[in-house]
Image (cartoon, grey):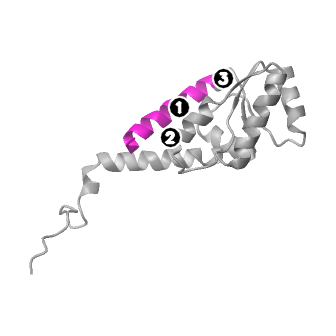
Amino acid sequence: MTDTERLAELERTIEDLVEDNLRYPVVVEGDKDIAGLLRLGLEGEVLKVNVGMSLVNFASDLAKRFSRVIILTDWDRTGGTIARRLTTYLEGESVEWDLEYRRRFARIARGEVRTVEALPALLENVRRRAEERLDPSVWEGKNGKSDQAPDQTT
């Protein structure tokens, strides 16, 4: 996938998440994740797991308030563990859960970022690289000549 394709997919995923977040809360790990999602334009509820209660109690609290939640934890071991445990507990509470955004962002990020809080930086970096590929001035060296290697004559 080129950076231009990644940018289009990333922007589409963000737009979809912003829209879905108006109906369903997004569950993240911490305050920095919330800040990152707000920078991406989310306007609905974004809830953090780390609120001083057990994951079982957190799931029970979610069940009292919501019929469906979007789980968007980091792409590291801890984030994966939280996502797996939370889905198990939510199933026990008959709450629908969605991990699709977690999967989509992971596929787009390709390991470039491993945290939800870093998604705005990923968007900026992919956008910059995509724009550089489209900008012919990037293809020229400082002296206006092509960046192709010079002839090696001796």
For the residue pair 142 and 1, the one nearer the viewer reads as: 1
Tag shown at residue 58: none
Residue type at mark 1: give it. Answer: Thr
Tag shown at residue 13: 1
Residue type at mark 3: give it. Answer: Leu
Q: Is residue 54 magenta?
A: no
For the residue pair 79 and 69, the one nearer the viewer reads as: 79
Alpha-carbon distance for marks 1 and 2?
Answer: 9 Å
Q: Is residue 16 magenta?
A: yes
- The residue at 73%/47% (across/down) is 78
- Image spot of residue 8 (x, y percent): 43, 35
First-in-chain label (1 vs 2): 1
- Image spot of residue 71 (x, y percent): 70, 32
Q: Does the magenta stretch mainly form a helix, a strand or a loop?
A: helix
Q: Which residue is mark 2?
A: 108
- Location of residue 28 by image quarter: top right
Alpha-carbon distance for marks 1 and 3?
Answer: 15 Å
First-in-chain label (2 vs 3): 3
* Of the two numbered discs 1 and 3 in the rendering, the one whose residue sits closer to the viewer: 1
Q: Assign a secondary structure to mark 1.
A: helix
Proximity of marks 1 and 2: CB atoms separated by less than 8 Å: yes
State the extent of the magenta-drawn residues as a range: 1-20
Q: Which residue is mark 3?
A: 22
Res. 55 in view: yes
Residue type at mark 2: give it. Answer: Ile
- Location of residue 72 by image quarter: top right
Specify few, some or many for label 2: CA neighbours under 10 Å numbering under 14, 14-19, or 20 or more.
Answer: many
